[in-house]
Image (cartoon, rainbow, N blue to C red):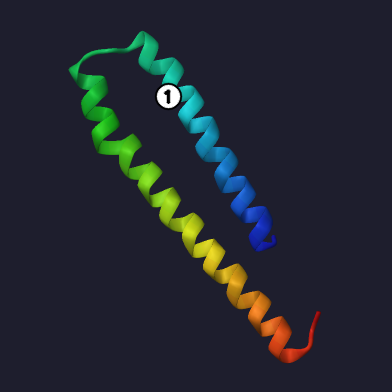
């Protein structure tokens, strides 16, 4: 799997998470939901954003290696 495909899949998964969580939040609105969001949903989103930045960095490194090695 290419880095581009991995990044697209991760972005799609985050979008699905946000959409589904939004729907759930409309039905489940109490202290337990807010705690669950704080403990699980928010950290997942932050970790996905970090992973996306990491994938960008890997892609940049791959491009650099291809340029320097003449493997376009």
Is 56 drawn above or below residue 45 in the view shown? Answer: below
In this view, the residue farthest toward the bottom is 69
Q: Determine which quarter of the picture holds residue 55.
A: bottom right
Q: Is residue 60 left or right of residue 53?
A: right
The x, y position of residue 35, in whole percent, is 21, 28
The x, y position of residue 12, in whole percent, is 59, 39
In this view, the residue farthest toward the top is 27
Q: Is residue 14 left or right of residue 64?
A: left
Q: Nearer the viewer, residue 29 or 60?
A: 60
| Residue at (39, 42) in percent of width and height | 45
Q: Residues within 10 Å of mark 1 (few under 14, many from 20)?
A: some
Which of the image's four quarters has the C terminus?
Answer: bottom right
Q: Determine which quarter of the picture holds residue 71.
A: bottom right
| Residue at (36, 17) in percent of width and height | 25
Q: Secondary structure at mark 1?
A: helix
Is 21 drawn above or below residue 68 in the view shown? Answer: above
| Residue at (67, 58) in percent of width and height | 4
The residue under label 1 is 21
The x, y position of residue 15, in whole percent, is 53, 34
Q: Nearer the viewer, residue 42 or 56?
A: 56
| Residue at (66, 84) in percent of width and height | 65
């Amino acid at each position: 799997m290419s880095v581009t495909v991995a990044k697209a899949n991760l972005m799609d998964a985050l979008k699905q998470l946000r959409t589904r969580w939004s729907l759930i939040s409309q039905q489940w609105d109490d202290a337990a939901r807010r705690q669950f969001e704080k403990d699980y949903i928010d950290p997942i989103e932050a970790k996905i954003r970090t992973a996306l930045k990491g994938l960008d960095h890997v892609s940049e490194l791959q491009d650099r290696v291809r340029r320097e090695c003449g493997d376009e």
